[in-house]
Amino acid sequence: MKISIITVCYNSDKTIEKTIKSVISQTYKNIEYIIVDGKSKDTTIDIIKNYESNISKWISEPDKGLYDAMNKGIALSTGDIVGILNSDDIFTDNKVLENVANFHLQNKVEASIGNIIQFNEAGKTVRKYSAKNWNPEKLKIGFMPAHPAIFFNRELFDKYGVYHLDFTIGADYELITRFFLKHNITWKFSDITTTSMLIGGLSSSGLSSYRLISKEIKKALTRNNIPFNYAKVKLRGFWKIVGFLNKA
């Protein structure tokens, strides 16, 4: 079973070496590693070239943003399974992909969902984000599993499409909604903690981001003909607090 790992980057010279090392140090060897660079102006390309013998394919050209770059990586991929590893993230240990491959071989699902760890710029772990209690119905109120902890069968992108570029920060949410709710793909929680992520990013940057992603959640659910209550979507922060208190 071949696993394609896609890293998209732009001016990532401060972090991408750690990302690359976390891929090439995996015990699982049937890996296709693809890097899609957006024509970086710093030394990112020099770092990529230093590891060129360990990278299956890489390109550097202007793109239309993060999701366009992900689509380019998917188009280049030939693996049985596809995973995304952002250019400021790393795998939690060197057996992650071995564990993911074994899980897919044993369970015969179209997607697996695991956990992530979030860390700050000082390197301190601040949160473990588990998908243990997640299910697709929660997409209707705006809750999705951590995108980097999902591994998809490659053929799903051929069947149901890739990331839609008319979303600013919610194309991953829309794709997950399309796959899990509209097309009812088979999936299972793996309980594998796959990725250590630098906290922050496109969809976690304050009130304006919260409002934008709320609108994009509505747009994604509407596009895929999923019934939902928009008031519950806008109040998803409240439901998170309720869930946290119920666990306490």
Image: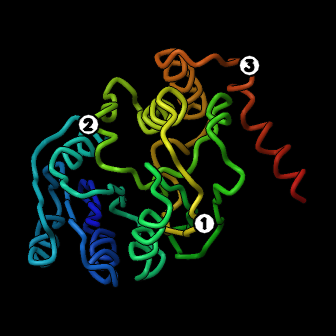
x 68%, y 30%: residue: 141
Up-down relation of residue 207 to residue 114 (above or below): above
The mark closer to the camera, 3 or 2, is: 2
Kindly state the secondary structure of the residue where label 1 is placed: strand
Q: Which mark is residue 158?
A: 2
Q: Which coloring applies here? A: rainbow
Give 122 or 53, whichever is nearer the viewer: 53
With 140 as the anchor, is 169 left or right in this view?
Answer: left
With 200 as the anchor, is 128 left or right in this view?
Answer: right
Q: CA distance from mark 1 to mark 3?
A: 31 Å
x 63%, y 59%: residue: 129
Q: CA distance from mark 3 to mark 2?
A: 34 Å
The mark closer to the camera, 1 or 3, is: 1
Give 204 or 228, whichever is nearer the viewer: 228
Up-down relation of residue 76 to residue 97 (above or below): above
In the rendered structure, which amino acid carries the disc numbered 2? Asp
Is label 2 in contact with label 1 (beta carbons under 8 Å)? no
Q: Residues within 10 Å of mark 2 (few under 14, many from 20)?
A: few
Count of labels shown?
3
With 218 as the anchor, is 229 left or right in this view?
Answer: right
Q: Position of residue 89 (x, y in %)?
A: 41, 66
Give 148 or 77, whichever is nearer the viewer: 77
In the rendered structure, which amino acid carries the disc numbered 1? Asp
Up-down relation of residue 231 to residue 64 (above or below): above
x 72%, y 52%: residue: 133
Please give the residue where the numbered disc 3 appears in the rendered image. Answer: 231
Please give the residue where the numbered disc 1 appears in the rendered image. Answer: 191
Kindly state the secondary structure of the residue where label 3 is placed: helix
